[in-house]
Image (spheres, rainbow, N blue to C red):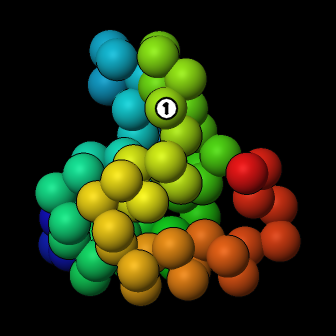
Amino acid sequence: VRTLLTFPGVNVHSTIRTGQNALHCAANSGNFEIFRMLWERGADVNCSDADGISVLMVAASGTMIDALRLLQEHKGLNP
């Protein structure tokens, strides 16, 4: 993922068929390093999947404290 994010034109806003974006996936897997990289590149922190599950909810359910701190810093976060 690190390498892919260095390519020009990579869309960090893409979603899979369930509506989850890469931040959902990173939070779900507990991978803070990838979560931070996506966040720094402007991935949509307000994305909700088809079931209405937000990135914040996924991070909180997995107790990703560092991810929750990053999200808290984001001025445009919709709780």
Q: Quadrant of residue 42?
A: bottom right
Q: Does 76 sit left or right of 49 as displayed?
A: right
Q: Which residue is disc 1 drawn over?
A: 53
Q: How many marks?
A: 1
Work out which residue is located at the far right of the displayed protein and give it: 75
Residue count near mark 1 (Cα–Cα under 10 Å), binned few <14, some 14–19, many ≥20: some
SS assignment at label 1: loop
What x and y, as percent, mark residue 51? Answer: 47, 16
Image coordinates for residue 26, horizontal then vertical, percent: 27, 58
State the residue in front, 63 or 4.
63
Q: At x 73% / y 51%, what residue is drawn? A: 79
- Tell me, yes or no, if residue 74 can be seen here: yes
Q: Decide if residue 33 is on the left or right side of residue 1.
A: right
Image point (32%, 15%), residue name: 17
Foreground of the two, 73 or 34: 73
Find residue 70 and report its horizontal and vertical position in percent: 56, 80
Residue at position x 42%, y 67% in the image:
38
Relative to 49, is 24 above or below?
below
Q: Position of residue 37 (x, y in %)?
A: 38, 77
Q: Give amino acid for label 1.
A: Ile
